[in-house]
Image (spheres, coloured by chain):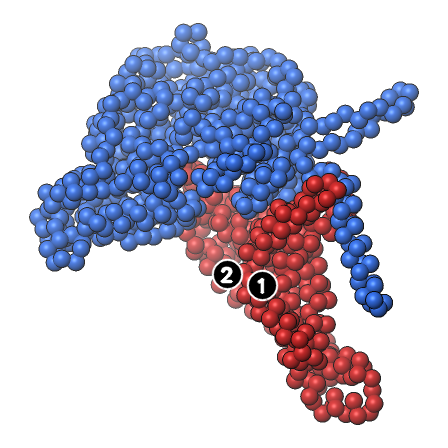
């Protein structure tokens, strides 16, 4: 297994390289650099030339990619626009952890990512945890009690849950819990409309939990319905297998049959899908973050795209690529650990 | 009830109690936060906690920095006005008033000295001597010179209007600086003031970092009414009263919190619920929803500077020389006039902008130069069709689209079909406007293919694929206008022949008229009589030539809570321009 992991990691390097080239080309060929929101419509050509030079946009695409990758401090650049490369560059390149300066803020993009990433991981981890807590028992029960009233109700709700547009659901949640329902003791809205915490009161577990309730609910609905339906289907396949019948014939308790024999096998495909969904923990959910004013990666990416903030966009996309590749690897490893039939040579 | 059900019930009750009691305890959902501050006296006796007054702004996204000069998203200006001052400000009528300056320099008071022979002038700025930065350092002429030097740094500076006309800025004494102009520049009063320019502290900002990069733009030192206390990126900014602020007794509100709330619906609801005190740039549809809310008041500018306008590309699409490659359709002024007659501006204003848009047909529609007699265009589709016939555009094949049959600008049979572009960020009213105009022009035989792009693509430099600068359009519609009281630079940027060079100005339609060039040159004078006369001549020529078709001004409105007093939307500045005067009811 160790060799396999090392081999996969080595294989990921050329893959990352290829993906980064494609992403860099796509992002940098998008028109509108230095004219995104927040940039002046009324820049003079001299100013545009200076900015293009400072951000390296005056270089051919290939050189821009090389500088982005390995920096330009090993060579000289033209800093004053006289056509003579006379000063050493300042960039270290992403391989040395320098993702460059944001076009919009003129500050290192890694600083923004660091702040927004932790907020997203916090929100999405809780969301996925709640998804797992709800979806697994619901999936098992609907399979075990196939065609029961419970199954029919859950199935109906699942279809509704999948059909509801996420953004609309968020608005409805705000309408109910922020606009309509009031705390009878204080007259204030029952739940806050957004943000991560109430300003000025310090840390309060209840306050932080209240701020999580609506965004987590909005994020959970779609995933719960998807995972529970998937697990139901998987469980239905498994519980009709011979080894489950054998387990029952041996006189095992039904709970043991279901959770030790059936569920473990039914979870195999689900674990794979769950691992592949892991990047969402880092990518965040745009709608949830916009509607509930949550400063996360989804919002940061969206703003960067609107701002044509190429360095920030590339940093987020590169980070996302790494997470996707690692998640795939994790899925394979976990699958092998759970299923003894799988061996990686 | 079995054990499981009991447990569930108890848990539910506990959860509900938790939510209810926590709401009880915090008491901070309302904007006015009563934060108890423990004051320790010599006798250590407990004292009554003073109440801090607080207001909450809700805005869609973080400002990039406090340097609104390098970004014009509006949020930068909003927060910049809380903490920093310029030499002057602009009032509702576009008149400059002194802020850091002790008085406005004028020819009459001897602070503006003209050299008529050489066409130059010197402007002496005398600063107030009672203004300090929040660290106690006085604001001096050194800061003015420092700001100018930072702006003009060849590598890290930033161009602002009028900068080309300055040969240098000298410090005369601690509180006096002289700006040497190499021309007569009527816009000198807002050279280092107005909406986007402030004076930066020489002793605090690191000049070696450069104007567009320096750290003091994100951690500003204040000489304005507030100081930055905290900035949590993506979440909120907290400002507290600057105890060194020069106006005695101001500001009266202790804290300003700026919360980042991206969704407009949520911002609206926070205003209604009393959780927010100010939301910028209220849209027409939002005004309709907020009108009957008791806690909320919409405040309008007396007029707005943004004029929705159609740009005609007088050069063929993809080119920038109207003489060598004239546009096959709109280079004929009769076609442009026919288009003007075919658009029902009043209906657009009423239906899509809910009556808040004001029909506008000249650049000189607001004080002090709204003295020219330019008649309002008449909506007359029949006359428009007749004019197209006269120009040689007829529909002989009966497909509803005219062709050139005797026109002067295209080959026979050329279809009257063009691309009509707008930008998406403005929202639904503009998209609807674009569609209605296309329909109305379709009715007179002009086929428009609609395109909606992002503003960044529309306005980018030609080297970055910008549609306007590279001339890659037929006609398009968007909004712009000049701020302050001096339209001269704006006219130069949009109508001067030199400004038609790609990336050099904003004369996107490539309108070349030597007469206009000459008149704009004449407008660079301090003689108000001459300027008014020149601008009226410009207005008449533009009305005849129609290089741009001005349609209407949309609203400039901001919404605030009724408890917040003193908010006044200003067409020449951001809403926080007079934040020091705001009070709480």
What is the C-alpha distance between the residues marked 2 and 1?
10 Å
Asked if residue B200 shows in the view, the reply is: no
Q: Where is residue B98 in the image (x, y as percent from the top left)?
A: 50, 16
Residue B11 falls left or right of residue B29: right
Q: Quadrant of the N terminus of chain B?
A: bottom right
Hey, which quadrant is residue B378 in on the image?
A: top left
Q: Position of residue B294 (x, y in %)?
A: 57, 34
Residue appearing at x 33%, y 26% in the figure: B365
Residue beneath disc 1: A321
Instruction: Return the residue found at the far front.
Output: B1
Name which residue lies at 65% across and 67% down.
A224
Vertical arrangement, residue B13 with respect to residue B481, above or below: below
Q: Can residue B274 be seen in this view?
A: yes
Q: Position of residue B559 (x, y in %)?
A: 53, 34
Q: In this view, does A203 lie above or below B493?
A: below
Which of the two labelled residues, at mark 2 and mark 1, occupies the earlier sequence position?
Answer: 2
Q: Mark 1 lies on which chain?
A: A
Q: Helix or strand or loop: what does disc 2 sit on?
A: helix
Which quadrant holds the C terminus of chain B?
Answer: top right
Q: Residue B303: give x, y in percent of width and height.
A: 40, 28
Which disc is residue A23 wearing? 2
| Above or below: residue B450 compared with residue B41 | below
Residues under numbered marks 2 and 1 in contact, where contact means CB atoms less than 8 Å apart:
yes
The residue that appears at 42% across and 22% down in the rendered structure is B94
Q: The blue chain is which one?
A: B
Chain letter for the red part: A
The answer to which quarter of the image holds residue B112 is: top left
Dot 1: within a 10 Å radius of its alpha carbon, few (fewer than 14), some, or many (20 or more) residues? Answer: some
Q: Do labels 2 and 1 share a chain?
A: yes
Q: Which chain carries label 2?
A: A
């Amino acid at each position: 297994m160790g060799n396999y992991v090392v081999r996969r990691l080595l294989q990921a390097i050329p893959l990352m390289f290829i993906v980064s080239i494609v992403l860099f080309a796509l992002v940098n060929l998008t028109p509108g650099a230095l004219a995104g929101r927040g940039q002046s419509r009324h820049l003079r050509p001299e100013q545009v030339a200076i900015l293009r030079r400072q951000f390296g946009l005056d270089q051919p695409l290939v050189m821009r990619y090389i500088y982005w990758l390995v920096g330009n401090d090993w060579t000289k650049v033209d800093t004053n626009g006289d056509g003579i490369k006379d000063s050493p560059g300042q960039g270290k390149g992403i391989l040395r952890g320098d993702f460059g300066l944001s076009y919009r803020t003129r500050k290192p993009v890694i600083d923004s990512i660091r702040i927004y990433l932790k907020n997203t991981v916090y929100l999405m981890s809780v969301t996925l945890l709640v998804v797992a807590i709800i979806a697994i028992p619901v999936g098992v029960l609907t399979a075990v009690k196939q065609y029961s009233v419970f199954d029919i109700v859950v199935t109906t709700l699942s279809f509704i849950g999948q059909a509801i547009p996420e953004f609309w659901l968020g608005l409805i949640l705000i309408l109910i819990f922020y606009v309509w329902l009031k705390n009878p003791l204080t007259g204030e809205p029952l739940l806050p409309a957004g943000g991560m915490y109430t300003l000025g009161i310090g840390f309060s577990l209840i306050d932080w939990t209240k701020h999580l309730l609506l965004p987590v609910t909005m994020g959970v609905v779609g995933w719960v319905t998807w995972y529970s339906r998937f697990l139901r289907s998987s469980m239905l396949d498994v519980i009709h297998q011979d080894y489950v019948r054998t387990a029952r014939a041996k006189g095992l308790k039904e709970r043991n049959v279901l959770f030790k024999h059936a569920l473990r096998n039914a979870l195999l495909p689900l674990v794979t899908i769950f691992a592949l969904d892991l990047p969402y923990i880092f990518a965040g959910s745009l709608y949830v973050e916009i509607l509930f004013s949550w400063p996360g990666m989804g919002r940061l990416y969206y703003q960067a795209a609107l701002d044509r903030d190429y360095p920030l966009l590339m940093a987020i996309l590169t980070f996302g690529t790494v997470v996707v590749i690692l998640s795939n690897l994790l899925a394979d490893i976990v699958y092998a650990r759970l299923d003894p039939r799988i061996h990686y040579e | 009830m079995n054990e499981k059900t009991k447990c569930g019930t108890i848990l539910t009750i506990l959860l509900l109690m938790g939510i209810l009691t926590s709401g009880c305890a915090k008491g901070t959902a309302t904007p006015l936060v009563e934060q108890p501050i423990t004051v320790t006296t010599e006798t250590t006796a407990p004292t009554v906690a003073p109440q801090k007054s607080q207001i909450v702004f809700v805005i869609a996204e973080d400002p990039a920095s406090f340097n609104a000069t390098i970004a014009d998203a509006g949020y930068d200006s909003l927060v910049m006005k809380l903490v920093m001052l310029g030499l002057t400000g602009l009032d509702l009528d576009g008149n400059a008033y002194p802020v850091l300056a002790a008085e406005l320099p004028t020819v009459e008071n001897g602070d503006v000295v003209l050299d008529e022979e050489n066409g130059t002038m010197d402007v002496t700025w005398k600063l107030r001597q009672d203004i300090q930065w929040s660290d106690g350092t006085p604001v001096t002429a050194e800061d003015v010179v420092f700001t100018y030097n930072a702006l003009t740094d060849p590598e890290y500076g930033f161009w602002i209007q009028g900068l080309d006309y300055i040969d240098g800025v000298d410090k005369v004494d601690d509180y006096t600086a002289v700006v040497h102009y190499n021309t007569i520049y009527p816009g000198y009063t807002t050279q280092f003031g107005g909406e986007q320019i402030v004076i930066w502290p020489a002793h605090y900002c690191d000049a070696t970092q450069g104007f567009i990069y320096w750290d003091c733009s994100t951690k500003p030192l204040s000489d304005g009414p507030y100081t930055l206390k905290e900035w949590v990126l993506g979440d909120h900014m907290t400002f507290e009263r600057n105890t060194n602020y020069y106006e005695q007794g101001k500001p009266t509100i202790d804290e300003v919190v700026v919360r980042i709330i991206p969704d407009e619906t949520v911002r609206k609801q926070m205003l209604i619920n009393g959780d927010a005190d100010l939301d910028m740039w209220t849209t027409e549809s939002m005004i309709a929803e907020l009108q009957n809310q008791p806690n909320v008041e919409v405040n309008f500018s007396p007029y707005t500077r943004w004029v929705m306008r159609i740009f005609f590309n007088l050069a063929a699409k993809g080119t920038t020389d109207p003489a060598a490659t004239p546009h096959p359709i709109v280079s004929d002024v009769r076609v442009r006039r026919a288009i003007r007659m075919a658009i029902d501006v009043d209906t657009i204003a009423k239906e899509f902008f809910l009556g808040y848009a004001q029909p506008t047909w000249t650049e000189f529609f607001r004080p002090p130069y709204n003295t020219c007699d330019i008649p309002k265009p008449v909506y007359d589709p029949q006359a428009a069709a007749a004019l197209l016939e006269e120009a040689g555009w007829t529909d002989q094949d009966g497909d509803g689209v005219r062709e050139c049959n005797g026109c002067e600008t295209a080959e026979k049979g050329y279809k009257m079909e063009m691309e009509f572009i707008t930008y998406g960020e403005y929202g639904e009213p503009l998209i609807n406007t674009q569609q209605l105009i296309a329909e109305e022009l379709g009715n007179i035989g002009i086929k428009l293919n609609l395109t909606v792009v992002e503003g960044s693509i529309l306005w980018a430099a030609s080297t970055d694929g910008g549609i306007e600068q590279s001339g890659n359009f037929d006609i398009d519609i968007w909004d712009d206008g000049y701020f302050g009281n001096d339209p001269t630079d704006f006219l130069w940027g949009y109508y001067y022949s030199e400004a038609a060079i790609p990336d050099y100005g904003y004369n996107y339609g490539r309108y070349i008229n030597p007469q206009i060039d000459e008149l704009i040159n004449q407008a660079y004078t301090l003689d108000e009589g001459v300027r008014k006369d020149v601008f009226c001549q410009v207005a008449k020529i533009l009305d005849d030539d129609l290089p741009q078709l001005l349609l209407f001004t949309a609203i400039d409105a901001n919404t605030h809570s009724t408890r917040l007093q003193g908010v006044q939307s200003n067409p020449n500045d951001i809403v926080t321009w007079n934040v020091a005067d705001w009070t709480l009811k």
